[in-house]
Image (tube, rainbow, N blue to C red):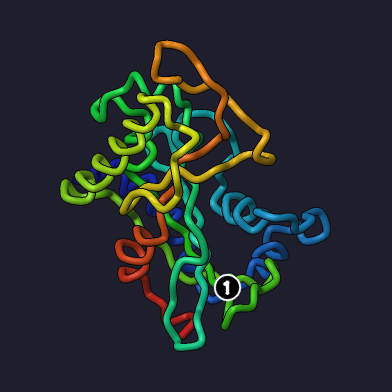
Amino acid sequence: MISSKVIEVLNPLFNIITNAKGKTIGQIKESLFIGDKCRMKKGASGLIIENLLGIENNNRDEADLPQIGCEIKILPLQKNKDGSIKAKEPTAIQMINYCEVAKETWETAKIRSKINLTFWVVYLAKVNGAPKRQDDYVIVDYFLDHPSDLQNEVFKKDWEEIQSYIKRGDADNLSCSMGVFLEPKTKGANNQDKTDAPDGKGGLTRVRRRAFYYKKNYTNTQIIPNLDLSAIK
């Protein structure tokens, strides 16, 4: 159920993205008067969207909109030569703390608060196999995601499979091919960027850093079909 408080908090954000549909990141930069100040490094377009929404970028565990427990996620799309529109890449949710995850149950898992309510902002980033300049990304639409009981069952099954690897000391054998909605994707400076994980024998071992990601299968089947894609068709 979506409460009236959630709608009250999010309505201004809905209006902002509705008014931005069809505009480019470059046009938004100009409207925010940050065109000359912003160097378009990787991920800069997502930060500009957060700026547009008035969201402060942070690395804290709490939600982007803590008063309603809502995450803000950016979803870049790619338009293929056959006209189909798909997610360009998986979407990061949060880093995996292997030692914490090993001790959690699904009912107490921290990731649940990160996927319970998500405001997705969507833009077109790639066309016919060619990536667009970040300034030329086009705002497409938004979607408010509150997974159903059936969707949460899939998330639970994926999470439990990942946890089983961690608990038995196989965290370094996790693969992004796992899961239906969730995948444990490597996320670090390089393969030597490691952290502690259970070794399955009561001790610790060092393994590559990973994060929980929404698989492209999730955004392709649960998010994109609910979007208004008229701005890019």
- The foreground one among 161 and 108 is 161
| Image point (30%, 62%), residue name | 222
- Amino acid type, callout 1: Val
- State the residue position of label 1: 138
- The foreground one among 128 and 165 is 165
Query: Residue 57 lies in what quarter of the image?
Result: top right
Q: Residues within 10 Å of mark 1 (few under 14, many from 20)?
A: many
- The foreground one among 9 and 136 is 136
In this picture, is 179 found above or below 19?
above
In this picture, is 149 found above or below 133?
above
| Image point (54%, 76%), residue name | 22
The single residue placed furthest to the top in the displayed view is 202
- The foreground one among 150 and 63 is 150
At which x and y percent is residue 144? Answer: 34, 55
Query: Residue 43 lies in what quarter of the image?
Result: bottom right
| Image point (50%, 81%), residue name | 80
Q: Quadrant of the N terminus?
A: top left
The single residue placed furthest to the front in the displayed view is 201
Circle 1 SS class: strand
| In this picture, residue 167 sits left or right of residue 122 | left
Query: Residue 188 lies in what quarter of the image?
Result: top right
Would residue 52 be seen by someone viewing this image from the given angle?
yes
In this picture, is 134 found above or below 101?
below
